[in-house]
Image (cartoon, rainbow, N blue to C red):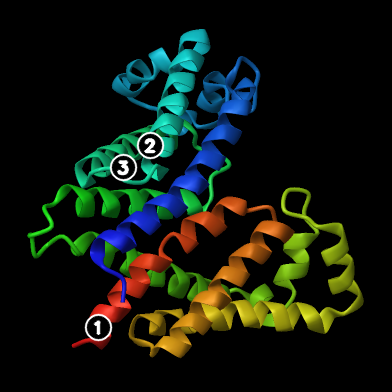
């Protein structure tokens, strides 16, 4: 069984690696936020004009437009990178780790507000992890509420898997086994070799699809599983996200969701010890 501090530290390192990767990628792609770029605010304002109806919203975002907006965005991303590096570095106090988590959380929320497109589920789970870590690190070790942050992370993780399974089951393509082939045939998430394999063997798409659904559906059991089954479920989830990273390119999913594993192991130990 992991201690609260050990679970929180391992979680911080894993999520930190993922955030460092995504932040560096974002910093290198900031040209897309310049005029006529993919994420230029003037272009997005046209696309979302029905949602920007009040004067206060227009005024609040003027400082994000143009060259000054790019400067501010670059500052936020650099601050996020610095905070993430600091979060990964070992042998610091919990107060410092909690402070880093708060800084990264604030920058992540800003980026979520500013960048409305191209995000995935790893963004939400990363924010959840950062909030849980900040709560855990900033509370004194003597507080009976310190584990609540880890409980929160673990609960959100198993809920995410279960909700994903229900969503897939309700989708006709996933039930028919053709969803994976459709995903791998797209320009954004496509993978030519994997797509060709599924086109040659349609039954393989069903096996892969229902395997994914099966792992996600039973995943909540991980909180009360004996050690052997716990390891099997965590390994299956890790393989699932590694395959997602390799085949579909959603590499941030791997770091975001594996970062929840220490909290799950901690909660599992608490529940089994009662």
| Residue 148, quarter of the rendered image | bottom left
Residues marked 3 and 2 touching at CB (< 8 Å): no
Q: CA distance from mark 1 to mark 2?
A: 32 Å
| Residue 266, quarter of the rendered image | bottom left
- Label ID, residue 221: none
Label 3: how many Cα within 10 Å (few below 14, some 14–19, many 20+): many
Residue at the disc numbered 2: 86
Q: Is residue 57 above or below residue 26?
A: above
Residue at the disc numbered 1: 271
Residue at the disc numbered 3: 101
Q: Earlier in the sequence, mark 3 or mark 2?
A: 2
Q: Is residue 170 visible?
A: no
Q: Earlier in the sequence, mark 1 or mark 3?
A: 3
Q: CA distance from mark 1 to mark 3?
A: 27 Å
Q: Earlier in the sequence, mark 1 or mark 2?
A: 2
3 or 2: mark nearer the eye:
2
């Amino acid at each position: 069984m992991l201690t609260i501090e050990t679970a929180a530290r391992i979680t911080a390192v894993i999520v930190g690696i993922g955030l460092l990767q995504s932040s560096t990628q974002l910093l290198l792609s900031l040209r897309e936020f310049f005029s006529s770029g993919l994420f230029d605010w003037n272009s997005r304002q046209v696309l979302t004009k029905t949602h920007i109806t009040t004067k206060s919203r227009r005024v609040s975002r003027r400082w994000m437009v143009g060259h000054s907006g790019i400067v501010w965005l670059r500052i936020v991303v650099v601050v996020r990178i610095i905070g993430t590096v600091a979060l990964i570095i070992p042998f610091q106090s919990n107060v410092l780790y909690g402070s880093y988590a708060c800084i990264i959380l604030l920058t992540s929320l800003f980026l979520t507000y500013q960048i409305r497109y191209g995000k995935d589920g790893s963004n939400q789970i990363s924010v959840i992890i950062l909030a849980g870590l900040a709560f855990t690190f900033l509370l004194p070790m003597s507080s009976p509420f310190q584990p609540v942050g880890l409980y929160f992370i673990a609960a959100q993780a198993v809920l995410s898997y279960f909700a994903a399974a229900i969503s897939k089951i309700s989708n006709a393509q996933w039930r028919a086994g053709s969803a994976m082939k459709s995903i791998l045939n797209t320009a954004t998430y496509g993978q030519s070799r994997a797509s060709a394999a599924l086109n040659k063997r349609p039954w393989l798409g069903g096996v892969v699809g229902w395997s994914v659904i099966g792992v996600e559906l039973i995943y909540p059991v991980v909180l009360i599983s004996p050690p052997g089954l716990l390891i099997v479920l965590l390994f299956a989830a890790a393989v699932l996200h590694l395959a997602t990273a390799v085949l579909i390119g959603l590499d941030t999913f791997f770091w975001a969701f594996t970062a929840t594993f220490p909290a799950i192991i901690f909660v599992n130990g608490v529940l089994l010890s009662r």
